[in-house]
Image (cartoon, rainbow, N blue to C red):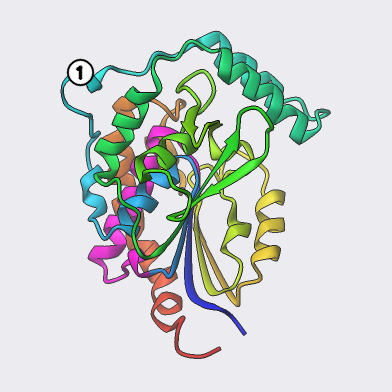
Amino acid sequence: MHALDRALVLGAGGLVGTAWTAGIASGLRRSGVDLGEAELIVGTSAGAITAALLATGQDPDRLAAPVRPAGSDSTPPQVDGRSVGEAFAVLGNAASDPAGARRRVGQIALAAETGPEQAHVARMRAMVGADQWPDRQLLIPAVDAETGEQEVFDRASGAPLSSAVAASTAFPGIYPPITINGRRYMDGALQSATNAGLAAGARTLVVIDPQAHLFPRELLHQELAVAAAHTVVTIEPDPESIRAFGSDLNDRTAWEPAYQAGLRQAADAAEQLGLAWKTGSDTD
């Protein structure tokens, strides 16, 4: 038996991945497939932004263009390029123990000069448009910057929704680790780009993975085996969307092209997903 009918997993992908995922969700909604109907939504890193929008019942069209906080909170990110490079070097070392690598990256993140935490929380609050957690089950994973261990935030965590999203999107050297309940947390994608294993128990599982073209699929396959869904649908960027992304996933000028690419690709995704999504609750 499956405890849930439908679950949705939204993966990491930087600024352009955020825009593309929102475009996919918007286009699917226009085609009659509302991803916000999922009983469980898991959002990692960039995926946490659209996950929060959908779970709180908002229209993902909110992200058709970049959203910035007003006033003094509109300061752009203070990127520490050296720390970003060091983090990627650690993560790219295939010989490293994953847990040890995350701890080392956490040290880099804590030492990086990336501006105040509250500025990043304000950015995420502006994008998400909510601080209250929804009744719908929403899981937002992050990684403890000191221990390298995963923490999964939900409505029982005692943290504002915008802080959880900020933590999950806090890539070392780009954004500061976010303090929640006395601990500092960084990007949830340092554990997994999708964390699809958190969606265990659903009959129908939809995974939207903006970085599918960039990394090996072994970890996702392992996580899908853990999730053990009856039906799995994965949506990943097609060649035209990949071209719209460009070479830098954090290039703000690619936001609108990526969003439009998601809207366009949603037509194919709706055909791929529609029957599974609409009939997911018919039987078990």
* Residue 103 placement (x, y as % from top left): 70, 27
Of helix, strand and loop, which mostly describes the magenta segment? Answer: helix
Residue at figure coordinates x 63%, y 40% from the top left: 215
* Residue 47 placement (x, y as % from top left): 44, 46
Q: In this view, does 6 lie to the left or right of 256?
A: right
**Element class at badge 1:** helix
Regarding residue 240, the answer to whether it shows in the image is: no
Q: Give the residue pinned by disc 1.
A: 72
Corner quadrant of residue 202 = bottom right
Q: Which residue is nearer to you in this view: 282 or 130?
A: 130
* Residue 50 placement (x, y as % from top left): 36, 49
In the image, the segment drawn in magenta is: 12-37
Quarter of the picture containing the N terminus is: bottom right
Q: In this view, does 102 lie to the left or right of 122?
A: right
* Residue 9 placement (x, y as % from top left): 49, 57
Q: Which residue is nearer to you in this view: 46 or 253?
A: 46
Position of residue 62 relative to residue 36, above or below, is above
